[in-house]
Amino acid sequence: MAREEQRGRIVDDERFAELPPEERPVYPIGVVARMFGVHPQTLRLYEKEGLIKPYRTPGGTRLYSQKDVSRLAQITRLTQELGVNLAGVDIILRLLAQMEKMKRREQAILSAARQLLGDRFDKLQEMVGDYLGPEREEEALVPVSPRPPAVPPRKS
């Protein structure tokens, strides 16, 4: 049977067992408000502004996950420590999410490229190392071929 206790207690509910731990809604609004030293109405305002979206029980109780709490920590830092208004917070959080998405995409592309290249890349690195020699291999930031010797100009 589900256990929903309010008044400052963490909620334990088997309905959320399949969710990753950081996404399980377990913190009632009062607990979260005390965590951040804000009034529960502030959290409701953040929800109204679309900055957070806590889970709602069938009875309407707001429950926050660890992921929500982490996001609230970001919001609190931006508003209280840096003086950013809520519109600015929204823009910053969207940009951070977009950057994270781009980072994951970049990692996926790099991983796919490494798989495609596989042994070819390792062989190329070995060839470059052999060409440059062991004493210059560490110095090379980019594999380049050495310059040919300069030819002195002819005298007429």
Image (cartoon, grey):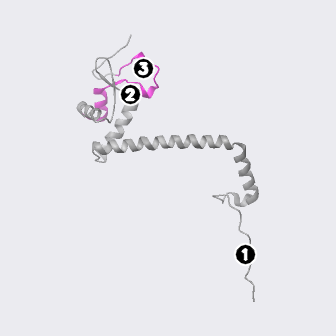
The mark nearer the N terminus, 1 or 2, is 2
Q: Nearer the viewer, residue 151 or 21?
A: 151
Mark 1 / mark 3, whichever is N-terminal: 3
Identify the residue at horizontal 58%, vertical 42% (top origin). Answer: 109
Residue position for label 1: 150
Q: Marks 1 and 2: which is nearer the front?
A: 1
Give, as a three-letter code, the residue at label 3.
Phe
Q: Where is residue 8? Give x, y as percent.
A: 29, 23
| In magenta stretch: residue 33 | yes
**Which residue lies at the image location 31% right of the left edge and 17% below the top edge?**
58
Q: Choose top left, top right, bottom left or bottom right for residue 152.
A: bottom right
Does 15 lie within the magenta span? Answer: yes
Between discs 3 and 2, the one toward the N terminus = 3
At label 2, counting other C-alpha atoms closer than 10 Å, the crowd grade (few under 14, some 14-19, many 20 or more) is many
Along the viewing direction, whichever of 127 and 27 lies nearer the viewer:
127
Disc 2 residue type (three-letter): Ser
- Please tell me in which quadrant of the rendered image residue 7 appears: top left
Query: Dot 2 corresponds to which residue?
Result: 65
Q: Residue 114, how many percent across, how many down?
A: 64, 43
> Mark 2 and mark 3 in contact (Cβ < 8 Å)?
no
Residue 83 image offset from top left, x and y in percent: 28, 47
Indicate the secondary structure of the residue bearing disc 1: loop
Q: Which residue is mark 3?
A: 16
Question: Which residues lie in the magenta part?
Answer: 10-38
Kindly identify the amino acid type of the residue bearing the numbered disc 1. Answer: Ala
Q: Is residue 39 above or below residue 155?
A: above
Where is the N terminus found, in terms of image quarters?
Answer: top left
